[in-house]
């Protein structure tokens, strides 16, 4: 939730001489507060209240300040005292509601926002704040109603337009989301991260109108250290590692700066076992857990104690039950504030805390910002640097982060000897044999396939695909049916490139076992750039379908190359668009050659490092031991390469 930051108001005019006498002191406190000198401002506010315990502005402003300092109990006390002094100030109840929302006391927060609206029904900020809370709870339609009401009351409310766009994007109403982000920028051309959100929504919709201009502007903003893009969306269009790092640093500094809450630092590895904590918002039927399920279950329990900190939700699936059995302790932190979750991590004595989200999904970067563990690591969920000085290590491999790229990561890079990506050999694949007819695919056609998310499809990649289709008569391209807007736009783009739109076939969402099984109907997977197939590439390889990739210049653009090398198929890694297209066309035109590649893939799946999960786990454990050994020796984090 990102409510409008509370700002210390100008003190109200005071009729009585006592209040008038402290006005200069109050103005000084407010000036210090606005300047970010919070400790000094707090002392001045406290001095005012020592002499005038019922001074409303000091109570309200100090409550806002204590919230920023994570002194939640004191902040709530101050807001409640201010309400006793003057119960008719709607903004006070918004401030109070924001505090309760931050501390995950959702029902009480809603009640506080309703109190604000009872005082002032046309209070746009109260509707907006309520919308942020509903969005955070996943109640998208309630959030949408609140944001829309805030906009009715204040049509130029940029915050409400932006958050409304985020909700519309989550509801797959991409055209409406694009309009909302566009309106945000018309109101405020430098609204934080709106330009990047607009570009990402357009990529999700495969709406490439004005894309080049928007992309150039975004890159210039990042280079100038402007808050223009969120790191996850920016990875889908950026092929420059230095720019990706700068984007992450800007975002982290703005949204998740280091927060000193006074946890005492301790030496890791003091217990009989190393305690590894995994913070993840996707402990369910989702890509991260699909990859990690077996790895978590294979950790050596004689040497490691595993703790799960769940910031997401249970989907009730068999995978969720399996995941819960894989940990020594499984703790729900979804309803805990960052401070309470960080305190729980600290009290659990975690030696190495692993962030499985980064800037993706239901992450809890704010917990890591409080530094609750002596060693903090980012792994798998977000393929890149967090740009945070409180993250010590990033787990990668020699392909995704080669030697020359280490400088583009704020963390120290720990490289596993094969692919950094874990896999699950126990993934169930349905025995169902789909016919091409029931999948909407023509019998006898060569089926190129890409089940990557639509935001990964760039105009350059799509143009390569269309040239490949033109060179292989009768072939079709089988894509993920992400949303109807993207499908319509892609068919239109195909026609513009001289390819009939009917040669694009869209696959609906299926349960993972059936989804894996339907891969058998594909002949060859075509990858995307600058953001490769990650889990989708592993899906295809596990199902026995070769993947042709173009190795990129960033972490997310090198993942498929890492996977192919680790499965014994480096010949499917290309290094130019021309070679990428030539290889795909050559394999389609030479059935015998493709059959040899498929046979080699089937043979290697049982022995290659990519699907040798025990070996991957052993390398992960070696990485954790190396990190702890350095810390215990009093040495700072450093780059580490794990031996094969």
Image: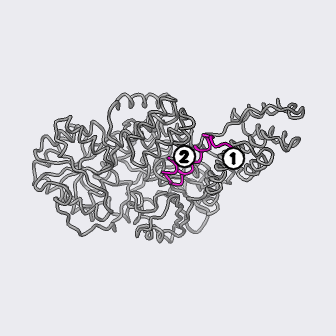
For label 2, the SS is helix
Q: Residue at x 52, y 61 (%)?
A: 310
The majority secondary structure of the magenta stretch comes to helix
Left or right: 288 as drawn, with respect to 445: right
Placement of 12 over or under 384, stated as above or below: above
Q: Quadrant of residue 107?
A: bottom right
On the image, numbered disc 2 is attached to which residue?
146
Left or right: 158 as drawn, with respect to 505: right
| Magenta region, residue range | 119-144
Residue 627 is situated, as x and y percent measured from the top left of the image, at: 52, 55
Q: Which residue is at the front of the view, 138 or 215?
A: 138
First in residue order: circle 2 vs circle 1: 1
On the image, numbered disc 1 is attached to which residue?
93
In this picture the colour scheme is: one colour
Residue 95 is situated, as x and y percent measured from the top left of the image, at: 68, 45
- Magenta stretch: residue 142 in it? yes
Q: Which residue is at the front of the view, 142 or 207?
A: 142
Q: Quadrant of residue 317?
A: bottom left
Placement of 232 over or under 292, stated as above or below: above
Mark identifier at residue 65: none
Left or right: 117 as drawn, with respect to 612: right
- Where is the C terminus found, in terms of image quarters? bottom left
Residue 480 is situated, as x and y percent measured from the top left of the image, at: 29, 51
For label 1, the SS is helix
């Amino acid at each position: 939730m990102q409510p409008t930051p509370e700002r210390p108001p100008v003190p109200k005019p005071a009729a009585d001489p006592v209040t008038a006498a402290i006005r200069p002191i109050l103005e000084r406190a407010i000036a210090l507060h606005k300047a970010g000198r919070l400790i000094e401002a707090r002392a001045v506010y406290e001095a005012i209240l020592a002499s005038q315990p019922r001074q409303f502005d000091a109570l309200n402003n100090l409550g806002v300040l204590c919230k920023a300092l994570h002194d939640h109990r004191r902040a709530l006390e101050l807001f409640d005292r201010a309400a006793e002094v003057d119960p008719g100030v709607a903004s006070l109840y918004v401030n109070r509601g924001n505090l309760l929302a931050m501390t995950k006391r959702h029902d009480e927060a809603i009640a506080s926002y309703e109190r604000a609206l009872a005082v002032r029904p046309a209070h746009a900020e109260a509707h907006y704040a309520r919308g942020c809370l509903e969005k955070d709870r996943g109640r998208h339609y309630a959030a949408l109603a609140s944001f829309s009401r805030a906009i009715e009351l204040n049509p130029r409310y940029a915050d409400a337009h932006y958050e409304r766009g985020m909700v519309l994007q989550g509801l797959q109403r991409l055209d409406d989301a694009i309009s909302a982000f566009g309106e945000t920028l018309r109101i405020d051309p430098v609204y934080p991260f709106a330009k990047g959100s607009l570009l990402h929504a357009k990529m999700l919709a495969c709406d490439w109108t004005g894309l080049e201009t928007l992309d150039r502007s975004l890159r210039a903003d990042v280079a100038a250290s402007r808050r223009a893009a969120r790191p996850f969306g920016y990875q889908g269009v950026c092929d420059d590692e230095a720019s990706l790092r700068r984007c992450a640093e800007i975002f982290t500094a703005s949204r998740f700066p280091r927060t000193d809450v006074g946890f005492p630092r301790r030496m890791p590895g003091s217990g009989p076992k190393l305690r590894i904590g995994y913070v993840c918002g996707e402990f369910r039927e989702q890509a991260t857990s699909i990859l990690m399920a077996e790895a978590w279950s294979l950790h050596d329990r004689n040497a490691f104690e595993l703790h799960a900190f769940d910031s997401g939700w249970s989907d009730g699936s068999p995978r969720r039950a399996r995941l819960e059995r894989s940990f020594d302790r499984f703790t729900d932190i979804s309803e805990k504030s960052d401070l309470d979750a960080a305190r729980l991590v600290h009290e659990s004595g975690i030696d190495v805390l692993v962030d499985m989200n980064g800037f993706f999904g239901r992450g809890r970067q704010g917990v890591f910002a409080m530094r609750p563990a002596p060693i903090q690591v980012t792994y798998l969920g977000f393929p890149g640097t967090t740009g945070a000085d409180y993250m010590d290590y990033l787990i990668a491999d020699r392909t995704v982060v080669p030697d020359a790229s280490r400088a583009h990561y704020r963390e120290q890079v720990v490289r596993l000897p094969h692919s950094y990506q874990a896999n699950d050999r126990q993934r169930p694949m349905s025995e169902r044999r789909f016919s091409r007819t029931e999948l909407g695919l023509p019998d006898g056609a060569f089926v190129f396939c890409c089940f990557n998310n639509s935001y990964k499809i760039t105009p350059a990649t799509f143009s390569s695909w269309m040239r490949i289709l033109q060179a292989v008569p009768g072939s079709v391209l089988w894509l993920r049916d992400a949303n109807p807007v993207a499908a319509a736009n892609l068919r239109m783009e195909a026609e513009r490139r001289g390819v009939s739109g009917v040669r694009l076939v869209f696959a609906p969402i299926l349960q993972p076992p059936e989804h894996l099984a339907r891969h058998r109907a594909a002949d060859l997977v075509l990858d995307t750039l600058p953001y490769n197939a990650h889990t989708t590439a592993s899906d295809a390889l596990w199902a026995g379908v070769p993947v042709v990739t173009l190795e990129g210049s960033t972490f997310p653009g090198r993942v498929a190359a890492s996977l192919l090398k680790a499965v014994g198929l480096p010949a499917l890694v290309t290094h130019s668009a021309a070679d990428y297209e030539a290889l795909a066309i050559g394999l389609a035109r030479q059935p015998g050659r493709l059959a040899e590649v498929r046979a080699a893939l089937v043979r290697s799946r049982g022995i290659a490092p990519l699907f040798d999960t025990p070996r991957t786990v052993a390398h992960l454990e070696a990485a954790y031991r190396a990190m702890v050994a350095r810390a215990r020796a009093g040495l700072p984090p450093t780059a580490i390469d794990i031996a094969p």
